[in-house]
Amino acid sequence: MTTEPQRFTILLVPEHVEDRGGASVEDSAVRSAVVEATGETGASGYPRYAGHGIVADIDPSTRTVEALLVDGAELDYGLTATVTATS
């Protein structure tokens, strides 16, 4: 039996950061949010997670963001979303 994670951390990171100067992805993020499973399935067919103004459909097996809204709008160009597991 496989259980899906109930919580992820989503980091919004500038897509074209050429030199982070040794900074981690977490340190380069312009916004982060812990999102929790809503129990719903999104239009993408993947589980929906929400929290702190972010709603995301995430493939829990690959940690790929399949759909994302930030404060009710699509992600701004030049930003990318990365996902990390949260305990």
Image (cartoon, helix red, strand yellow):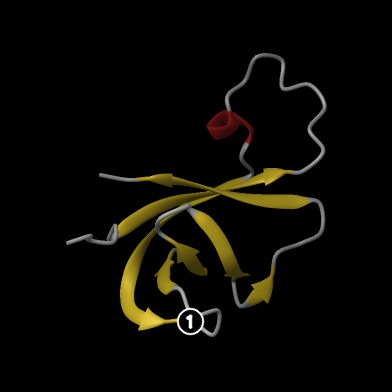
Q: Position of residue 86 (x, y in %)?
A: 32, 45
Compared across the picture, whether 19 is left or right of 29 comes to right
Return the residue at label 1: 42
Image coords of residue 14 (percent x, y): 74, 43
Q: Nearer the viewer, residue 69 or 52?
A: 69
User: Which residue is farthest top?
Assistant: 22
Q: Is residue 39 above or below residue 51?
A: below
Q: Is residue 69 above or below residue 28?
A: below
Taking 81 as reference, is 58 above or below it? below
Where is residue 66, by image quadrant?
A: bottom right
As drawn, the residue found furthest toward the left would be 1
Q: Amino acid at mark 1?
A: Gly
Q: In this image, 37 relative to 81: left or right?
A: left
Picture coordinates of residue 82, whole percent (x, y): 57, 47
- Identify the residue shown where x is 46% and y is 62%: 59
Quarter containing the C terminus = top left
Residue pushed farthest front?
1
Which one is nearer the viewer's eye here, 74 or 47?
Answer: 47
Q: Horizontal and vertical percent for residue 85? A: 37, 45
Q: Circle 1 sits in a helix, a strand or a loop, which is it?
A: loop
**Count of marks placed on residues:** 1
- Please tell me which residue is depicted at 41% across the width and 69% down the height of the picture: 49
Q: Quadrant of the N terminus?
A: bottom left
Which residue is painted at 64% across and 33% down in the image?
A: 28
The residue under the point 46% across, 54% down is 33
